[in-house]
Image: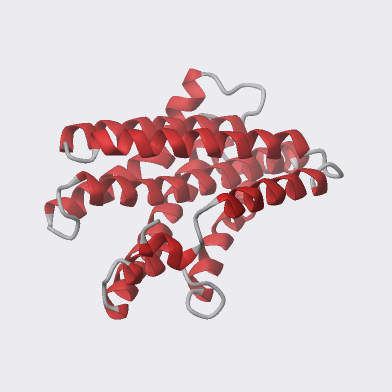
Amino acid sequence: MNGIGDAVVRIGPVLAVAIVVLAVVAVLVNRRSGLAIDTSVATLRAVVQLAALAGVLAVVVPHLWASALFVVVMAVAAAWTSARRVRRENAGLVVIARCLVPVAAPTIAIVIVLTLVGVLPARGIAIIPTAGILLGGAMVTTSLAGRRAVDELATRHGEVEAALSLGLLPRDARLEICAAASASALIPGLDQTRAVGLVTIPGAFVGMVLGGASVWAAAAMQLFVLIALLAVSSIAMLVTVELVAREDL
């Protein structure tokens, strides 16, 4: 095994057994909450998708056009995941397409701008992981903000009607009820940024140091990732709440 991999965990049969045991523990613990099947499916998907990812990246990374196409596929998958969370029973093509706005638009715009100004090299090895991290953050925020907004409007429907009776426009009435609750979707990202270096040592930081970069370069890269995530997540939350308030999502 290579030195970098063995420096983090020792790759071998014992690691495989540890992964299986941890997955079983997660499934058993989640039986009480009714999420055992979801946990099993998530685990199996992670195994299959990571194996596929390794094979796909070996092919697409050397080609910029293929890397860009792969980012588009990632964006659609992220939008589909968020759509299923926001509209559990009605995650059709229209909802998925609309989820592309908060999930993919801010990420792709930021990656393009950073590439044009030279912050990101115009290479797949830089663009794919950066876009993947940002798409993941936007996806989680869209799912949390959208689900919370929909639930809040359903629970507090009477307050929406009261706001309408006072003369507020439908969009403004719904926004008045769901905006504050949906902002809680930003808490994970804010806590992650606050706690970095104190509670958590992020993977990007560790990976760069193990790859031979200086700790200062690794810190700068990690700071960039965290701030970019905050920017993307903030935009995703704002757009998601607006779409729900307009009944477009």
Q: Which quarter of the rendered picture does the N terminus lie within? A: bottom left
**Residue 165 visible in the picture:** no
Residue located at (54% from left, 39% from top): 46
- The answer to whether residue 244 is above or below residue 228 is above
Above or below 87: residue 138: below
Name the residue: 30% across, 66% down.
Answer: 211
Q: Judge left or right: residue 102 versus residue 115.
A: right
Extreme residue toward the right, this view:
32
Task: State which quadrant residue 87 falls in.
Answer: top right
Residue 42 image position (x, y, % from top left) = 62, 37
In which image quadrant can residue 219 be found?
bottom left
Relative side of 150 to 196, left or right: right
Query: Which residue is more in the foreground, 228 or 208?
Result: 208
Q: Is residue 161 visible?
A: yes
Q: In the image, residue 17 lies at what x, y percent?
A: 65, 49
Q: Residue at x 74, y 45 (%)?
A: 24
- Give the side of residue 184 with respect to residue 67, left or right: right
Figure label count: 0
Colouring scheme, one of rainbow, by chain, secondary structure, one colour:
secondary structure
Residue 215 in the image, given as x and y percentages of width and height: 32, 79
Q: Residue at x 45, y 31 (%)?
A: 77
Nearer to the camera, 15 or 172: 15
Horizontally, residue 193 falls left or right of residue 109, namely: right
Q: Position of residue 10 (x, y in %)?
A: 51, 61
